[in-house]
Amino acid sequence: MYTLKKSLGQHFLIDENISRKITGSIRPSRPGQLLEVGPGGGALTKYLLEMEGLNFKAVEVDPEKVTHLLKTYPALEGKLVNKSFLEMEKPFEGPFSIIGNFPYNISTQILFRIIEWRGDVQCVVGMLQKEVAQRIAAAKGSKVYGVTSVLLQAYFDVEYLFEVTESCFNPPPAVKSAVIRLTHASHTLEIKSDKKLFLLVKTAFNQRRKTLRNSVRGLFDPAVLKDDIFNKRPEQLSLQEFADLTHQMN
């Protein structure tokens, strides 16, 4: 039917129970708009197409999979975009949700694009490498709390839903997988600007073993750096503390 391309990191989900569990976790609005990222062989697509009252689109970079999907699921005609998710324009006007078995080699880039679209993105359900999912959901103080933890949790509520074993895929990946859900943040952070937050968080965690005073000294005036908060390492700071510091940056 189709070939698996290692260059695209293709590992296709073959467990029907997991497919139903993933698609059942999405919460599009009614009437809803939903984008599937990387449908591949259609493991999720066939269940998504059954959802009533849904304005559905899918984006797939591999032309061979596009041909297979259109032949297998004629209802996809006019709904399938043959392009990389990272290169496509925003797929809908107004609110929409996103679902997918995200290609693990670009999953972080996908999530940062979703941050860019956060004003319209209502819900995201994505399967990722387990370690990446754990980092996204990590709490302050965790060894894996880092850039993706802070930046995604600043804009979304993160739920670590469930894990998926290697045997659920063909071919089985060398890494474990997990599914997360993102929804609009229930908290409100007063951030000076997104640009300042991204710069602060990335600079701080680039040298995560150092105290903030040493890692981010170039972003603040010397007088500000005297504050006790700069004695902490980045993984010790809460979302609110990162947000507050953006107002004191140069």
Image (spheres, rainbow, N blue to C red):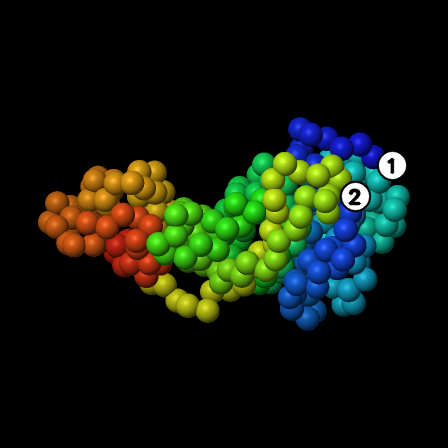
Q: Nearer the viewer, residue 149 or 203?
A: 149
Residue 161 position, x and y percent, is: 59, 60
Judge by depth and name the residue closer to the eye, 214 or 113: 214
- Label 2 and label 1: CA atoms lie apart by 9 Å
Residue 45 picture location, percent across and down: 77, 53
Who's the residue at 79% across and 40% down the image?
66
Mark 1 closeness class: few <14, some 14–19, many ≥20 residues within 10 Å: few
Which residue is tagged 2?
Answer: 41
Task: Kindly identify the residue that appears in the image at 67 percent across and 48 percent down.
Answer: 165
Whether label 2 touches label 1, CB < 8 Å:
yes
Q: Relative to the observer, which residue lies in front, 103 or 166? A: 166
Q: Is residue 101 above or below residue 121?
A: above
Q: Is residue 105 left or right of residue 227?
A: right
Question: Residue sitting at 67 percent across and 33 percent down?
Answer: 8
> Quadrant of the image for the N terminus?
top right
Task: Give SS at disc 1.
Answer: loop
Residue 1 marker? 1
Q: Left or right: where does residue 123 sit relative to residue 36?
A: left
Q: Position of residue 142 (x, y in %)?
A: 39, 52
Residue 179 placement (x, y as % from top left)? 61, 54
What SS does tag 2 mark? Answer: loop
Task: State left or right for residue 112 relative to residue 202.
Answer: right
Q: Amino acid at mark 1?
A: Met
In this picture, is 196 found above or below 154? above
From the viewer's perspective, tell me whether residue 102 is left or right of residue 193.
right
Three-letter residue code for mark 2:
Gly
Earlier in the chain: of badge 2 and badge 1, it is: 1
Residue visible at 61% across and 47% down in the picture:
177
